[in-house]
Amino acid sequence: MTSEAPVCVIVVNHNGGELLRRCLDALATQTTLPKEIAVVDNLSTDGSTVFLETLSEPLASRVRLISPGLNLGFAAANNLAAGRTSQPWIATLNPDAFPEPDWMASLIDATRRHPGVAMFGSTQLDAGNPLLLDGAGDVLHASGLVWRGHHGAALAELPAEGEVFSPCAAAALYRRDAFEAAGGFDPSFFCYCEDVDLGFRLRLAGERCVQVTAARVHHVGSAITGRRGGFATYHGTRNLIWMFVKNMPTPLLALLTPVHLALNAVLLARALVLGQAAPALRGSWDAIRHIGPVLASRKAIQARRRLSTIGVARALDWSIAGIIRRRARSLPIPRSLSFPPPLGGSDPIASDMPK
């Protein structure tokens, strides 16, 4: 009998087409099935969710469609689904990410081995070439630049399991109580950088993130929003500034703001070369124009901060090589976060799984 895990997998769809079907087909083959799968449809017009009405087991009893009637974006759509489940764990999965059969089992195994951890990331393989990595955990540079670690690197270079700054939400696992305590994803971000922003807030609250090498998905990447288009440039530019201003502790904010301004100048020059200057300028302007609510959020976030300024600094990448090579930054996992689960059924996940 296939085991179950107390997890709600959230798939946010917007005109996902056959990608959504392929994603759910991959979930159906999991050796450990999630108890719930919530598909949030952001006002698709391509009929991509029609097939959900004819699903067979093991998906039929697990999948529920949530149709908010408008395009909420990735952030708010995940929050909506997370608020409608009682499962202790929530997994975010893009419709263009196709998990291998032991993806869920590997993530659950990691929660047992690292019971003090609230965030887990997946190894993302390039769906077009599985010998290449699409990502191995998100990295935050001291300048405020973010990237998916090891994007485009050979699979042979995959780092060992370790602690990373935050998971890429294309395929991530979060402890629901920590997710909710942090306020979930920031809905004002809509999409792009919302996962690093959430990871930053969780870290400030004292939480950690482990990148699970064995939990693998094949990721198309930007299949829904498109690569380097105006939409991605606008949201990426605006949200990068908001994320930096909201979360960086005051001593680091004072030290690094000139570096962050220089970074944004470089990114604007790059956008000009790529023909994306207009959305980049609009993103920068809107980030400044709507900075008031961001500063209000910052005040609340910093008041609740448990991680020291030095602790934040240690979690950042400070190297020039990091910016150039965009490699993952995987650190050894503290022993306090890694120990075998107790014997006798007191493991909260094991006790919730069928015998």
Image: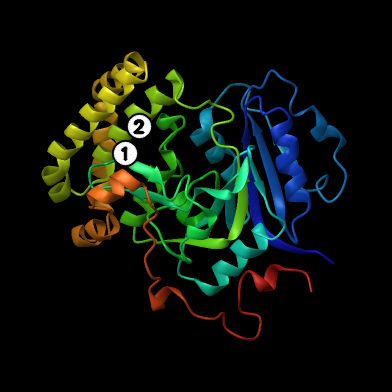
Secondary structure at numbered mark 1: helix
Secondary structure at numbered mark 2: helix
Q: Is residue 341 left or right of residue 315?
A: right
Q: Amino acid at mark 1?
A: Met
Q: Is residue 317 left or right of residue 15?
A: left
Mark 2 crowdedness (10 Å alpha carbons): few <14, some 14-19, many ≥20: many
Query: Which of these two is toward me, 300 or 21?
Result: 21
Q: Is residue 44 left or right of residue 177?
A: right
Q: Residue pushed farthest bottom? A: 343
Q: Residue pushed farthest top? A: 278
From what the image shows, is residue 104 above or below residue 228? below
Q: Position of residue 220 (x, y in %)?
A: 60, 38
Q: Is residue 174 visible?
A: no
From what the image shows, is residue 129 above or below residue 208? above
Q: Residue at x 66, y 58 (%)?
A: 104
**What numbered label is drawn on residue 74?**
none
Displayed quadrant of residue 206: bottom left
Q: Which residue is mark 1?
A: 243
Q: How much space separates mark 2 and mark 1, taking CA atoms?
A: 6 Å
- Colour theme: rainbow
Q: Residue at x 23, y 52 (%)?
A: 319
Circles 2 and 1, Cβ within 8 Å, touching? The answer is: yes
Q: Is residue 284 visible?
A: yes
From what the image shows, is residue 187 above or below residue 87? above
The quadrant of the image that shows the C terminus is bottom right
Q: Position of residue 342 (x, y in %)?
A: 57, 83
Q: Which residue is mark 2?
A: 239
Mark 1 crowdedness (10 Å alpha carbons): few <14, some 14-19, many ≥20: many
Q: Amino acid at mark 2?
A: Asn
Q: Position of residue 325 (x, y in %)?
A: 34, 47
